[in-house]
Image (cartoon, rainbow, N blue to C red):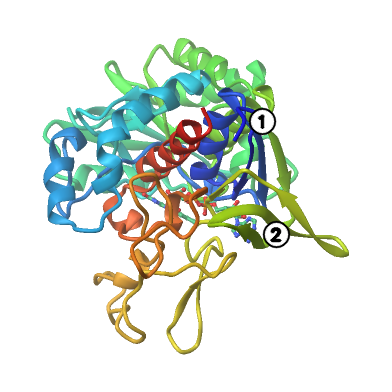
Amino acid sequence: MSAAGRVMVVGAGLAGLVAALRLARAGRRVTVMSRGVGGLPLSSGTVEVLGYAPGRVASPAQALPAFAAASPGHPYGILGPVLAEALGWFSAETPGMGWAGGLERNVLLPTALGVPRPRALVPATMAAGDVAGGGSLLIAGFRAMRDFHPALVAANLERAGIDGLSARPAWVVQTPRPDAADAGATNLARAMDDPAFRRAVAGDLAPHLRPGDRVGMPAIIGMERAGEAHADLEALLGAPVFEIPTVPPSVPGLRLHAALTAAIRGAGGRLVTGPEAVGAEWADGRITGVVVREPGRDRVHPVDACVLATGGFAAGGLELDSHGVVSETVLGLPVHAPPPGEGLSPGYLDPQPLLAAGLRVDARMRPLGADGAPVHVNLHAAGDLVAGALPWREASGEGLSIAGGYAAAGAILEATR
Ligand SMILES: Cc1cc2nc3c(=O)[nH]c(=O)nc-3n(C[C@H](O)[C@H](O)[C@H](O)COP(=O)(O)OP(=O)(O)OC[C@H]3O[C@@H](n4cnc5c(N)ncnc54)[C@H](O)[C@@H]3O)c2cc1C
């Protein structure tokens, strides 16, 4: 294959975008074909690598080797060794996020319910929210924003049992939509791009501030100009300010999505949103084309390699039928899943092995057939579609997606040198 190899990445979640960016940077002709925008706009915009194993993890770097050894078939068994390199590359490729943290120590950042949740990387706008060392927090909510309750966040933080941590609530009455009953996260974020609105917000908060406070607020500090808005707000308040991830739509998730898609386009990659991949053509053990359902017809896009990053059940990469059988939806690849009827436990919070269903892959992220050999030598998979992880329970989703997308791209680059 020539260095100008055509690669199709199916799926525009974190795994697909990371794979596409690495391939495009290396000069491959990349098309990202996705039915929808992927999970990033729903995600917190942070990078969770390993948060629970099953107790809260203080250091992913220290916990990962034992975690992978104790979890046969977990993708970190393959991806653990490439994780640090992948995260370093990812941080360098998304400089506007100003990532803080690393694999050595998880940052403990409050959720919108006030639960300190471990995350390996957080954007600069959240860095002052690490509550591990305690401190005095002023948690600000916007009266117009119905999904964020500062009193609840503050009360739960005080109950979290962290030495030296105190928190109290305050309200901001400013709203970008004075004629409407409420304002959403994206309305507020766009308003915070405006210096006048930021001044008004700081004016509401200033009377509540005490010396030594850090100010937490929902993640709405700027859409296009978050860095400037965050620095300005800190200067206006004379205190460190941090964002707390909100329920979707997530402004930091949208920022990360925008950063990655802009980088892919800047590197010459193409993003097509809407059409669905429905099959493939192959010859001699290789995928030669991906069949895409376009308005009025199915069209075959010739490829030299393909990355399948269609996500799990939530995104439609996997499907469960009424008999309890799990299938992979694009190519009908062999799925590793519990036997029908055995994958779900009755309690919501009980272990749910079905959620670890997916494709088994080799060290080059190639899906394996029943015989243990790669199904196609030039087909790779990454992200939630890969079997063996419980991202929501482990808080591992972004780490796996970044490392998986990076490794899948790396395998293609090696094969097409
Ligand atoms: C709502 C939500 C919340 C989550 N919260 C957490 C969390 O708190 N912690 C955690 O660790 N993990 C969490 N996860 C797990 C999360 O899935 C991973 O972190 C990671 O983002 C998955 O990325 P992905 O690229 O594999 O898939 P996704 O982001 O799901 O993207 C899949 C992509 O494939 C596309 N697609 C699917 N089928 C086709 C097709 N046939 N043709 C073309 N395109 C197709 C979709 O449109 C989408 O673009 C959450 C997931 C969701 C959905």
Check the picture and name the quadrant holding the N terminus: top right
Mark 2 or mark 1: name the one nearer the start of the chain. Answer: 1
Determine the residue located farthest toward the right in the rendered image.
296
Determine the residue located farthest toward the bottom in the rendered image.
323
Q: Nearer the viewer, residue 336 or 367?
A: 367
User: Mark 2 and mark 1: span between their CA atoms?
Assistant: 32 Å
Q: Position of residue 112 (x, y in %)?
A: 40, 46
Indicate which label's residue lies in the foreground, 2 or 1: 2
Label 2 CB-ligand 1 distance < 8 A = yes
Determine the residue located farthest toward the front in the rendered image.
284
| Crowding near the residue tagged with mark 2, few <14, some 14–19, many ≥20 C-alpha atoms within 10 Å | some
The residue at the point 46 percent across, 89 percent down is 323
Residue that carries the numbered disc 2 in the rendered image: 276
Kind of residue sitting beneath label 2: Glu
Label 1 CB-ligand 1 distance < 8 A = no
SS type, badge 2: strand
Q: Quadrant of residue 290?
A: bottom right
Kind of residue sitting beneath label 1: Arg
Is residue 332 visible in this depiction of the protein? yes
Q: Nearer the viewer, residue 90 or 214?
A: 90
Q: Position of residue 395 (x, y in %)?
A: 31, 49
The residue at the point 56 percent across, 65 percent down is 316
Residue that carries the numbered disc 1 in the rendered image: 190
SS type, badge 1: helix
Q: Position of residue 327 (x, y in %)?
A: 49, 73
The residue at the point 46 percent across, 25 percent down is 205
Q: Nearer the viewer, residue 391 or 72?
A: 72
| Crowding near the residue tagged with mark 1, few <14, some 14–19, many ≥20 C-alpha atoms within 10 Å | some
Q: Position of residue 334 (x, y in %)?
A: 44, 69
Q: Nearer the viewer, residue 45 or 375?
A: 375
